[in-house]
Image (cartoon, coloured by chain):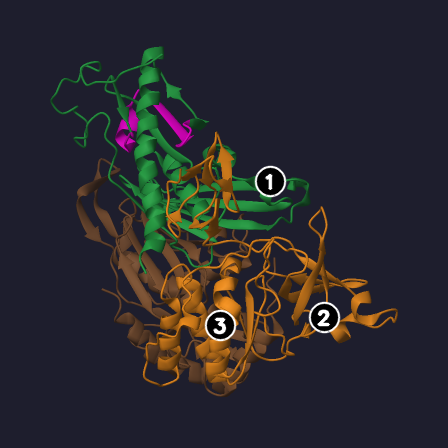
Amino acid sequence: MIFVEDKEIVIPGDILADEEYNSGRGTFKENNKICSSLVGLVAIRDKKISVIPLQSKYIPKRGDVVIGEVTDIRFSMWNLEINSPYSGFLPASDVFGKEKRELNRTFDVGDVLFLRVVDVDEVKKVKLGLKGRGLGKFRGGILINITPTKVPRLIGKKGSMINMIKDETKCEVIVGQNGVVWVKGDPAMERVAEKVINMIEEQAHTSGLTDRVRDMLATLLGREPVSDDSEELENSEIEESEPEEETTEDEGINRNEG
Amino acid sequence: MVRIVPEIIKESVTNLVKNGERTDGRAFDEYREITLELGIIEKAEGSARVKIGNTQIIIGAKPQIGAPFGDTPNVGVLMTNTELLPMAAPNFESGPPDENSVELSRVTDRCIREGEVVDLEKLCIVEGEKVWMVFLDLHVVDYDGNLMDAAVLGSVAALMNTKLPTTKIVDDEVVLDYDNMVPLPISDKALMSTFAKIGDELLIDPSLEEEDVMGARLSIGITQDGNICAMQKGGADTFTKDEILKAVSIAKIKTAELRTLLP
Amino acid sequence: MIIIITNTNLGTGTETSGRADNRAFDELRKMKIEAGVLERADGSAYLEIGGNKVLAAVYGPRELFVRRLMQPNRAVLRCKYNMAPFSVDDRKRPGPDRRSVEISKIASEALTPAVFLEKFPRSTIDVFIEVIEAEGGTRCAGITAASVALADAGIPMKDMVVACAAGKSDDKVILDLSEVEDKEGQADVPIAIMPRTGEITLLQMDGNLTEEEFGQALDLAINGCKIISEKQKAAIKNRYGDE
């Protein structure tokens, strides 16, 4: 038996369902009942109940692509802040191979990089890497922070939302799974993209968002808002990125060179 | 804990400024949205809450009877203390006031004292022995840039909101009459405007991002009559004489605008 | 042992209980809770009850720089309770006093049982409680607000801890003592519970009560907590409900 509806807002301690159902992310089992551990939206898939949090920190996972900032340079590595309780490190060998070179000539404190999470060990040391298409240092542009759980919403089904923003503002946009977004284009367009992204973050849990984003873009770009019934952009859910499903990787994230 | 500002942010803010723009679209001499509420704490004899943008300070004024300073036996005392609460920013730590907290307290105090906001001579009860001591406590709960202007605006508002019991001397004892409260004697409303220097430009009311990027800061306190009563340069970069004089003339105009927010 | 509380048991009859603010013996003061009131903090809440005004804020989980406090398999929860100098009648000197240190400890111990600390090893969850104005019962107000701030910050929890005090004043066992009732009263019993299971996470008592009176006070406080719990939930839902 289930006590809540799909997309209902729940809070920690709320009883969601009884033992007929399976406990997914954001829930826990107590005395044959499934309860929410978070403030978030109920997501029911078959017999699995999860809660998608409205607020969260980024916990690094192997395979994720993230945007990080160099905060320190040590003997053979860079330390990076990745918008997480856990900081990451990039070994020098990843960049130089066997050559010795001054690390700070390549990446200095304050540089912003697009990296992959290579490994997270049991003491939460996060190893980052630069080998991969599109990874590297960003030049120019602006940075925007959003809650990591809203990244799928920002990207949209098959990248629909993020592509709409890119097309309208003619900006390059790269979204890190750690909730950091890089935007580069004409400075005025960068600010338009920033406003739209902030609006998506605030309203990620609501429906009808795609239309409002389209209208906002039109208004900010000086055009008449037009409401559109096109189905392919109709998307009224926060999408979960369940560890098993990994729906948000390559398609959604633009791999343009920074 | 020191914040390390990404190069990208430094560049984008600086480039915008070169083009005469700011990240939030404000003009160089424009303040963010300001709200001011008075009398929000009943237990404080005077209080105010001020918000400039998202920077938020709660100020309480509590008078006590105490001894005057030796060199000014017939003058009341003003004491200002600031708590940069750890909740206000991720890099604020618990503990006794650090150099930023102390500087903020002293500059606010200086602006109010030299601007003669409170008529301290009217606070004498028994010359050489008992005067009113007004404790101004600034509680910074949210830090989003430009604490100085918020601190001074909120403090002046809290002082204007302050009431004291009337005093009588009966048999060498000071008797406080809480049934007959009088407002703290206010004789001026000196306020402060702060500028950030980014590149070669002066920007008023720096946001958090602008403070992260700026080379130096200049805070200027101006009285009702348009005189300068306090100044403080902060940061490791430099100002030219012309920049300082230009800031003064802008400050005179902007503090007058801020003053219209006071009751 | 089941204790049933009725007016007649406590000898108050059916007329007003004679409390200074005309409340019934089991009536809470007027309360307001708001979630998400600060910009920089990860989570925050503002709470008013009677003349109390409390701000709570949470940062975390975040990196813990004091290595000796770090736990290998879970986060640590650090709580700091502080009173503003202007929050009380006679100005309080800034800085922690012994009372604040004790309350910080028990608040942390009241909140910890509800938090899934194992999800964030080697990190810290920092809770800050700031009393802006005090009127009896600040530690309970603080813990209640802190729970809302923790939920607002997205910290995973079993339940939202809620706190409330009962006590004895004027020879009557009453709920939610005001400042006057606390100062002149005969006993004060602050508690905190996880409302779904009723487990008690905070318990203090000072004063003089018979065993029966203590049982009555405990029941009053637990019921008070359950009422306040509904307000906590409403505060969170209001934050996201309005679009």
Q: What color does chain B have in the rendering?
A: brown
Q: Single out the mark in the foreground, 2 or 3.
A: 3
Q: Which residue is mark 3?
A: A160
Provide residue C186's location: percent of width, then percent of height.
Answer: 31, 19
Q: Which residue type does callout 3 highlight?
A: Ser
Q: What is the span of residues highlighted in magenta in the rendered image?
A: C176-198
Real-space Cα distance between discs 2 and 3?
Answer: 24 Å
Provide residue C198's location: percent of width, then percent of height.
Answer: 40, 27
Q: Nearer the viewer, residue B2 or C191?
A: C191
Q: Which residue is mark 2?
A: A132
Residue at the image position 24 percent from the left and 16 percent from the top: C171
Real-space Cα distance between discs 2 and 1?
Answer: 33 Å
Residue at the image position 53 percent from the left and 55 percent from the top: B92
Q: What color does chain C have in the rendering?
A: green
The C terminus of chain C, quarter of image? bottom left
Q: Which residue type does callout 2 highlight?
A: Gly
Residue B132 in sight in this render: no
